[in-house]
Amino acid sequence: MLTRIDHIGIACFDLDRTVEFYRATYGFEVFHSEVNEEQGVREAMLRINGTDDGGASYLQLLEPTREDSAVGKWLAKNGEGVHHIAFGTADVDGDAAAIRDQGVRVLYDEPRTGSMGSRITFLHPKDCHGVLTELVTSAPPTASHGD
């Protein structure tokens, strides 16, 4: 069962400049940053608030590390802006299977590793009214956030 908006992914050309905008304008600070080589992105997670299920909601800022990455291709076509929405779940495998059973295309056969050690999969935007949708099961909390 989906429990929260985990994050909203925003594609950008210059991660440092975009982080500074969100810090200066809204006071949001980087909670975690990393490079995901598999997905070809450098990212920063800006924590917005905690949630009832013990998780949190974030803005995820994404800068491609290579032009052929999914975010790189998306930026070339669309420019900067909202790339996807992600919903938190305790069971990404079970929820992805249930959603697949409803006829929605799930883009990964098996969930992959996402930000902060989470497990993720995506739903096809054509089956979700034009919105690329991610399902996220957060990793157990740790002392380090990788910044």
Image (cartoon, rainbow, N blue to C red):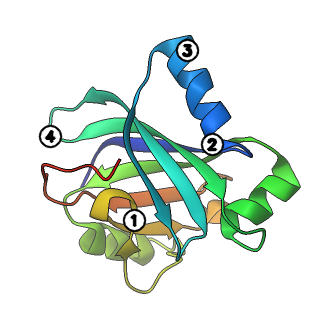
Are dots 4 and 3 in contact, CB under 8 Å?
Answer: no
Q: Specify the amino acid type for callout 2.
A: Leu
Residue 88 image position (x, y, % from top left): 31, 51
- The answer to which quarter of the image holds residue 102 is bottom left
Mark 3 or 2 closer to N-term? Answer: 2
Q: What's the residue at 69%, 71% (across, down)?
A: 69
Residue 95 image position (x, y, % from top left): 30, 67
Numbered disc 4: secondary structure: loop
| Mark 2 nearby-residue class (10 Å; few <14, some 14–19, many ≥20) | some
Cα–Cα span, label 4 and label 3: 29 Å
Q: Specify the amino acid type for callout 1.
A: Gly
Residue 104 image position (x, y, % from top left): 52, 70
Position above or below: 47 against 112:
above
Cα–Cα span, label 3 and label 1: 27 Å
Foreground label between 2 and 1: 2
Foreground label between 1 and 4: 1
Position above or below: 134 against 60:
below
Q: What's the residue at 52%, 56% (across, down)?
A: 133
Residue bearing mark 4: 53
Are dots 4 and 2 in contact, CB under 8 Å?
Answer: no
Mark 4 or 3 closer to N-term? Answer: 3
Cα–Cα span, label 4 and label 2: 29 Å
Q: Specify the amino acid type for callout 4.
A: Asp
Residue bearing mark 1: 114
Residue bearing mark 2: 15
Q: Specify the amino acid type for callout 3.
A: Ala
Q: Name the quadrant of the N terminus.
A: bottom left
Mark 1 or 4 closer to N-term? Answer: 4
Residue bearing mark 3: 24
The residue closer to the viewer here, 21 or 80, is 21
Left or right, 93 with respect to 12, comes to left
Numbered disc 3: secondary structure: helix
